[in-house]
Amino acid sequence: MTTWIRRFPPPDGTADDRVRVAVKDVIDMAGVVTTAASAAVRDAATPALVDAECLAGIRASGAYLVGKTNLTELCLSPVGDNAVFGTPVNPLSPDRIPGGSSSGSAVAVATGEVDVALGTDTGGSVRLPAACCGVVGLKTTWGRVPTAGVWPLAQSLDTVGPIARDVTGVVTGMRLLEPGFVVAAAPVQRIGRLRIAGVESAMEEAVDAVLDAAGFTVREVRLDGWEASIDAFVTIVLGELWHNHHRLVDLESLSPFVSGGLRSGGEVGVAALAEAMSVRQVWRAKVSAALSEVEALALPTMVAPPPTLTDFVGFPLTALTAPFNLAGVPALAMPITATATATGSATATGSDAVVPPSLQLVGPAGGEELLCATGLLVERALARSASE
């Protein structure tokens, strides 16, 4: 039961043909306690009085809300583990992390228990579990999907987005979040290839191979200030975490990891937070400028295959995802083949082979429609390659 914090019965006692939806347990549902997968929160909580705003389209659609999914406590870790509520099991490789913080949402999709799951993404928390579990996740443009009624980690970065087994499922998820959502008529043609230091060559080669197979015009691009953007991201997350949840810091039921994060947030001064906000403005301008020269950016979602549950300390999980949260732009993470490279050689062996590399496509603010059209094109290219 580690995937779920709470399950709901099927409508009318049947599992009919309705879309099955999982909801990360940071999103309020009327009459249900929102735990944020934290004993400290659960023990003091009362049932939500109303739904979070982002559930309006799902309710109107008549979708089957299967349950509320597990996560890393208070959304704070990208690992996906949880000592109190249990750690969702990565169905592709049980010895490896499921990715977080939306771990239960990705696992529920990957195991076929739901068609669409909602997650939140502050620094990679939709894209990373999607990458770890071999499914598709969309980080939406900051502010596009309302977050009223969603437990905040860092409100100036938090987003809500869908996870599904394929891009078509993600489109379904966007239509549930935003009725009337329509995929762009055409995918991008010009892609900026972004290369960041520290990424394993196999991951880079897999991305290059799929971009080539899909027939994109690829241009190498640079984004100066990558490390500074990550530093600013960390400062903002910790500062806003403290502002939102400092009252929890002395509770014995709070995990040491979260307590430590809160205390670090308490050390973020006004001047440091203001400087980080200034860095963010500069960074957003740089990303916007890059996306004015190409239609989308492409890079891996993770620097390497997901680490094991016993050896994840120090693994730079958010190294390729957090900067795009700081920029506020949308990003799609999707699995790509783990065996075909530009030279046709194998890129993964052993337990790594069952966790395919994940392509991250980044678009301009409000560009979810374009990213979905492009993701569909990539999936068709992968299907052609598999059949040859």
Image: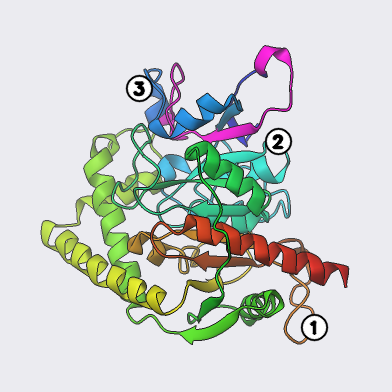
Task: State which tag comes first along the sequence, 2 or 1.
Answer: 2
Are the residues flagged by discs 3 and 1 in contact, CB closer than 8 Å? Answer: no
- Category of crowding for the residue at label 3, using alpha-carbon neighbours closer than 10 angstroms: few (below 14), some (14–19), many (at least 20): few
Badge 3 element: helix
The residue at 27%/57% (across/down) is 236
* For residue 221, side relative to residue 388 (left or right): left
Q: Quadrant of the C terminus?
A: bottom right
Q: Is residue 234 magenta?
A: no
Badge 2 element: loop
Name the colouring of the figure.
rainbow
Q: Quadrant of residue 207?
A: bottom right
Q: Which residue is mark 3?
A: 44
Q: Residue furthest right?
A: 388
Q: Which residue is mark 1?
A: 344
Q: Which residue is mark 2?
A: 113
- Category of crowding for the residue at label 1, using alpha-carbon neighbours closer than 10 angstroms: few (below 14), some (14–19), many (at least 20): few
Q: Which residues are magenta?
A: 11-40
- C-alpha distance separating marks 2 and 3: 30 Å
Q: Is residue 23 magenta?
A: yes
Q: Position of residue 174 (x, y in %)?
A: 53, 44
Name the foreground residue: 13 vs 271: 13
Q: Position of residue 225 (x, y in %)?
A: 32, 78
Name the foreground residue: 52 vs 217: 217
